[in-house]
Amino acid sequence: MTMEETLQQIKEDFELLGDPNAIVEYILEMGQQNDMKLPPELKNDTTKIHGCASDAWMIEECKDGKVRFTVEGSSELAKGMIPLMLKIFNDRTPDEILSFDPQKLYELGFEKILSPTRLQGMEAFLNRIYAAAKKCKEQDRS
């Protein structure tokens, strides 16, 4: 499934849920099911996603021409947003990520359900994803 198709699937799921409160509840439930953890020694200033409202850490890996992410968030909302974002961005080629317009995520209505501070955290998360894709693409050229 392409990134666009994945985004469309999430959009349709959100539309079925209807109102913003139900979407937030869905994201929080995803957070309760998210068991992605980083070892304590990998939670440091280098892996921290600076700009997030709550603590979150990301490890980026470029392997077999694809970018893979391991992410842990400390709040329930962050824990729920992580699998949602990884559905779109994880295990993709750098070109797939770099050609995807992150503004399309706003089609999901995040500005209606996330506070300005949480939106800034999402932007910080996306900046790390795109930086990892650029770095992976440069490594592939070497």
Image (tube, grey):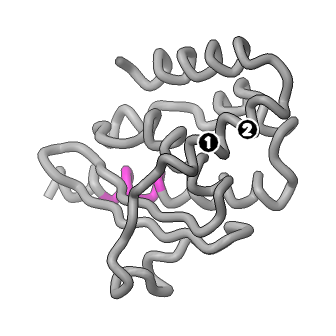
Whether residue 74 is situated above or below residue 108 in the rendered picture: below
Q: Is residue 32 left or right of residue 46?
A: right
Counting from the top left corner in percent of width and height, residue 62 is at: 23, 55
Q: Position of residue 7 (x, y in %)?
A: 55, 23
User: Quick one: label 2, few (<14), some, or many (20+) residues within 10 Å?
Assistant: some
Helix, strand or loop at label 2? It is helix
Q: Reply above or below: 24 against 35.
A: above
Residue, x 60% and y 37% (percent of image)? 102
Counting the numbered discs, the total is 2
Which part of the image, by quadrant, shows the N terminus? Answer: top left
Are circles 2 and 1 on residues that touch, CB within 8 Å? yes
Q: Residue at the spot x=73%, y=19% of the render?
A: 17
For the residue marked with disc 1, what is the amino acid?
A: Glu
> What span is in magenta?
129-135
Disc 1: which residue: 29
Q: Nearer the viewer, residue 139 or 41?
A: 41
State the image coordinates of residue 83 (x, y, percent, origin top left): 48, 44
Give the residue type at disc 2.
Glu
Residue that badge 2 annotates = 25
Q: Quadrant of residue 58?
A: bottom left
Marker disc for residue 94: none
| Side of 104 where 30 appears, left or right | left
Residue 132 painted magenta? yes
- The one nearer the camera, 135 or 75, is 75
